[in-house]
Image (spheres, grey):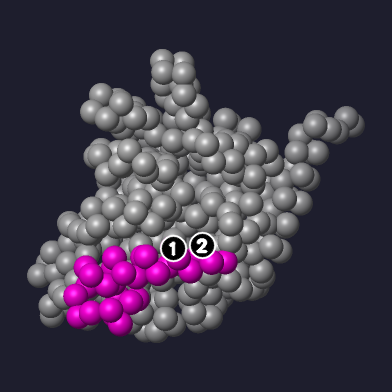
Amino acid sequence: MKSFKIGDLTIKLPIIQGGMGVGISLSGLASAVANEGGVGVISCAGMGLLYPKFSKDYLTNSIMGLKEEIRKARAKTRGVIGVNVMVALSNFSDMVKTSIAEKADIIFSGAGLPLDLPSYLQRESTTKLVPIVSSARAAKIICEKWKANYDYLPDAIVVEGPKAGGHLGYKNNQIDDANYSLEHIVPEVVAEARHFEKLYGRRIPVIAAGGLYTGEDIYRIMELGADGVQLGSKFVTTEECDASQAFKDTYINSREEDIEIIASPVGMPGRAIAGEFIRRVREGLTRPKKCPFHCIKTCDYTKSPYCIIMALYNAAKGNLSRGYAFAGANAFLSKKITSVRETIASLQTEFRAAELRRKRGPLSV
């Protein structure tokens, strides 16, 4: 696995840990991945729910909580720390400003097109900006808009395929369509990135994400032109993951048929592990009575079958009867709890084995 650069940051290990909310990837997991040479990512989704101690105001608590998580991570590592900020968050602006003020190394932003993200940078800002897209068209739009409006190009681009966990940037009929597979869209996004590199003389690395789980997966997708990969589910079943043991056990005990596509209150399809709560939602047995958070721009609690932030928070804390676990398509491959170091060592071994098989070529008979 070769190192690569995001702006002036050297990423020694080309593995980005995906941002997972609510409360799944915080300073504990992020710092552990950063210590191994990858990029550790804190998810700011639902941060105000995780930090009720500061005030009675969700938005204030979100700002203070993110500050604390970034500072905790910095105390544990000298590696690269990023923050995942979804465009769909109602406090998107606050979370971006806080990340930049706290000197997070990178902001990863998806769940919508972050067309105004560069506008938050100040002259002295050091934070790198990395949009998350689901198509070459979205990558092109962002590059054109950022360059025209801010004279800025993405420091890297994450392209996320339909096998990812959580909210998906695809329609239901696209999720199993080979034309939208990660293997199909990575070369397209790479070609778009190379086009803008030639135009403006600035390197834009491409990071592939969505359903990648093994070292062989990493080797295969990097052979298609990706400079690095983003893994989420792989890191859930680590000792350092910030989720409860019950949440991790949901992954370990899952079967392939348990992982399904659900309808999220935010208006997007999502991939999650089936359970009691999802069954009750389908039977119409849940209904939010109020919305104290207003966390997602597109969510109307009067029309929603449940409060997604509470469902994800409950699951992270281990109360799976009142929530569910988002998971990638290959999360069922999780068999045991390991450390981040062991997980990465295993990925490297699998990567080298795949590389060796490729070099040897097909065996003659």
Name the residue nearer the viewer: 307 or 342.
342
Residue 213, placed above or below residue 284: above
Principal secondary structure, stretch drawn in magenta? helix
Which residues are the magenta region? Answer: 48-76
**Residue at (44%, 63%) from the top-left corner?**
70
**Residue at (80%, 32%) from the top-left corner?**
359
Mark identifier at residue 74: 2
- Residue 359 shown in magenta: no
Separation of residues labelled 2 and 1 (CA atoms)? 6 Å
Q: Look at the numbered disc 2 and give the secondary structure of its residue.
A: helix
Name the residue nearer the viewer: 347 or 4.
4
**Residue at (34%, 47%) from the top-left corner?**
110
Tell me the residue that label 1 is attached to: 70
User: Which quarter of the figure has residue 14?
Assistant: top right
Amino acid marked by disc 2: Arg
Question: In the rendered image, is residue 75 in sight?
Answer: yes
The x and y percentages for residue 303 are 12, 67
Query: Are the two marked residues, 2 and 1, in contact with CB atoms closer than 8 angstroms?
Result: yes
Residue 100, placed above or below residue 262: above
Q: For the residue carrying disc 2, how many other residues have a C-alpha within 10 Å: few (<14), some (14-19), or many (20+)?
A: some
The quarter of the image holding the N terminus is top right
**Residue at (19%, 71%) from the top-left corner?**
293
- Residue 66 shown in magenta: yes
Name the residue nearer the viewer: 54 or 199.
54
Q: Is residue 60 left or right of residue 83?
A: left
Can you name the residue that lies furthest to the right here?
365
Amino acid marked by disc 1: Ile
